[in-house]
Amino acid sequence: MQLQSSDISIAVTVYRRLDFLAEALDSAVHQTVPVKVLLYDDGCQDLPRLQAILARYGDRVEYRRNAKGLGLFGNMNASIAASPTSWMSILHDDDRLASDFVERILEAAPQIDRCSLFCGRTTYLMPDGKAFHQTDPINGPWRRLSPEQYALRNWFPFPGQLFHAPTAHAVGGFPTHSIYTGDWELWFRLAMADGVVQLAALTGFHRVHLGADRGTTAAAKSGRKAACCGMQVKRNFARLRAAGSPARFDRQQWLREYRPMYRDLLIYAWTMPRWLLRYNRRLLLMANPPGRITHLLSFLSRVAGSPALRLAGLARLLGTRAGLRMPQTF
C-alpha cells in the first residue's frame, strides 16, 4: 500500500470542553511527519477562549464551525464528508496522539496490501495527564485483525486511528443514535470492508475522566455500558452471518475478550438502578476475575448479591473523597 503524508489529515473535534484542547492540537500539529490539521467546532460557547487557543497555531490549523449543532457522531460524520484527504484520523479534544503517529503508519503501509483502518497501542491517562495503563502488546511490528476478532471487542480506545474516509462514508459513517458503541460500529464495518491493521507501536493517549461532558459517561453512569457492548457484539455477528460467515455469538467467548472491569461498575454502583446493577453483576460472575481485588469482589457479590457491589461502590466513593488513590485497572 502506497501512502504519503499528503494523503493524511487529522480532524480534531470540539464541543464545549476546552481544558485539554491545546494538548490535543499540539499532538496533531507537532507530528514528526507533518500533515494537515483541521478543527471541527460543534458549537463552542466560549469563542474568545477558543480563538486564543487557535491563535497559537496560525495557519497550521484550519478552523471549521458547524452552522448548527450536530452532536458527537454527527460532527465526526461531517469531518469525514469534508475530509480534504483520502485518509484521516479523528482526535477528540481530551485525547492526544503519539508524536510519531503518522510516521509509524507510513513505515508500515508498504508492507500491507490493503486495509481500511489502522490502529495501534494506547496509553491511558488520568485527568492530570499521568499514565496508569497501556493496552496489551502484540507480537511483531503489526498484525491484521479479522472481522470475526473485531466482532467480539473493540481493540483500541478512540485516539490513534487512521481510516480511509471514502470507505467510512460508503459504509454509513458513525451511527448518530449510538450512546456508547458508535465508534466500534464503524470500525467493525471497516473490518468487513477491507480489514484492520493494528500496529505494535504506541499511537494514542486516551484520557479517562468522569466529566458530564464526555459522551460515553451517561452510558456508564446508567449501567448500560456492558449491555450496549453485548448488543453491539450480537449485531456484529448478525452482519457476519448475513455475509456468509458461520460465526455465532458465544457469550463466554465474548466475556473472555470483553473482560468487564469492576472499576467501571463500582464508580457508579452506588446510584445505579437495581435491575441494571443485577444485570452487570450476572456478567461479572460469568467472567473470570483477573486479579486479587476482582476475586474478592466476585466472592462478595456471589455471597451477598448486588448490595455487596453497591456498598463496595460507596466505599470507593468515600475513599476517593478522602484523598485515597483507588486502583485504576481492576
Image (cartoon, grey):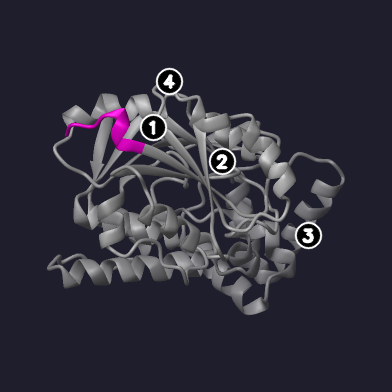
Camera-near label (3 vs 2) is 2
Residue ID for mark 3: 314
Q: Residue at x 76, y 39 (%)?
A: 325
Q: In the drawing, does residue 184 fall left or right of residue 226?
A: left
Label 4 and label 1: CA atoms lie apart by 23 Å
Location of residue 115 in the rendering, given as x and y in whole percent from the top left corner: 21, 44
Camera-near label (4 vs 2) is 4
Determine the secondary structure under disc 3.
helix
Q: Residue at x 56, y 69 (%)?
A: 224
Q: Amino acid at mark 4?
A: Thr
Was residue 95 drawn as part of the magenta stretch in this picture? no
Camera-near label (2 vs 1) is 2
Nearest the camera: 108 or 142?
Answer: 108
Q: In the drawing, does residue 195 fall left or right of residue 90?
A: left
Residue ID for mark 2: 95
Residue ID for mark 1: 137
Q: Which mark is residue 32?
A: 4
Q: In the drawing, does residue 29 fall left or right of residue 234?
A: right
Badge 1 local density, few (<14 within 10 Å), some, or many (20+)? few
Label 3 and label 2: CA atoms lie apart by 29 Å
Say whether marks 4 and 3 touch (CB < 8 Å): no
Q: Which residues are magenta?
A: 1-8
Determine the secondary structure under disc 1.
loop
